[in-house]
Image (cartoon, helix red, strand yellow):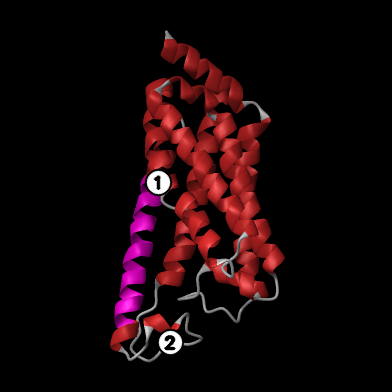
Amino acid sequence: MASVAQSESLSANGTGAAPKVALIGSITTLVLLAALHVASPEFDPSWRMVSEYALGRYPWMLAAFFLCWALSSWALVAALRPLAASWIGLAGLVLLALSGLGEALAAYYDVSAETMHGVAATLGVPTLPIAALLIGVAMDRSMGRGPGRPVMRAATHLTWISFILVGASMALLFSTYAAAGGDPAAGPPTSLPEGTIALNGWANRLLVICYCGWIAATSRRLMKLASA
C-alpha cells in the first residue's frame, strides 16, 4: 500500500512545475556550456577544465551555468520528495541536494578561491552518481518499470562512468605531463609540453553532459508517469 501511495504522489508531482524546472534547467545548463565554448575559444577544451572559464572574459556566464545546474538539481529533489518515505530514497535525495549545493557554491567561489572551489567540487561531483543509483532503486520500487525507465537507467550508469573517466584522464594528464618535463608542483601551466596526453577537459565536459542528462531523463520519466 505504501508503494502505491508513493507512486500516486510521484505521479501527482509529475504534473507540477518542479520536474519541468529540472528539465529546462538541465538543458539551459548545457546551452550555457556550449555558449562558453564559443565565447571563450582561448581555453583549449582538451585540457582546460570548465571551471577555468571563470578566468576568461565571461565569468558571469559560468556563474549562470552553475546556478542553472544547481536549480535543476534542487527542482528534481522537490519533484521526487515522495521518495523520502524510504531510507534509500531519502539518502538519494539528500545527496542530490548536496550536489546542488556544490554547484551553487561553484557559482560564487570560482577557481581563484581555490579552497572553497575545492569544497564545492567535493560536494557537487562525487555525490550525484551515488544519488542517481539510489534514486533509481527507489523509483523502481515505487513505480515499477514503466515508461522512461530504460533511458533513465542508461543515464544513471553514465554518471558514474563519466566520473571514473575524469579521474583516469587526470591521472593520465599528470603522469604524461611529468614525463614530458613539466613540473606539476609549479602550478597550472599555460601550455603543455609535447608528449602530454590531455583528455581531461573532454572528460570534464562529458561529465557535465552525463550529469545533466540524468536530471533530464529522471524528470522526463516522472512526467511520463503522470501522463500514463
Tell me, yes or no, whether the highlighted magenta stretch contains residue 24. no
User: Which residues are drawn in magenta?
Assistant: 157-176
Q: Which residue is mark 2?
A: 192
On the question of residue 145 being in view, the answer is no
Considering only vertical position in the picture, is 125 above or below 168? Answer: above
Q: Whole-percent x and y of residue 223? A: 57, 30
Q: Secondary structure at mark 2?
A: loop
Look at the image and tell me in which quarter the N terminus lies. Answer: top left
Q: Residues within 10 Å of mark 2 (few under 14, many from 20)?
A: some
Residue occupying image coordinates x 39% and y 91%: 193
Q: Is residue 17 left or right of residue 128?
A: right
Main secondary-structure element of the magenta-colored stretch: helix
Q: Which residue is mark 1?
A: 129
Residue occupying image coordinates x 39% and y 38%: 150
Three-letter code, disc 1: Pro
Which mark sits nearer the N-terminus, 1 or 2? 1
Q: Residues within 10 Å of mark 1 (few under 14, many from 20)?
A: many
Q: Whole-percent x and y of residue 19? A: 60, 34
Three-letter code, disc 2: Leu
Residue occupying image coordinates x 48% and y 87%: 191
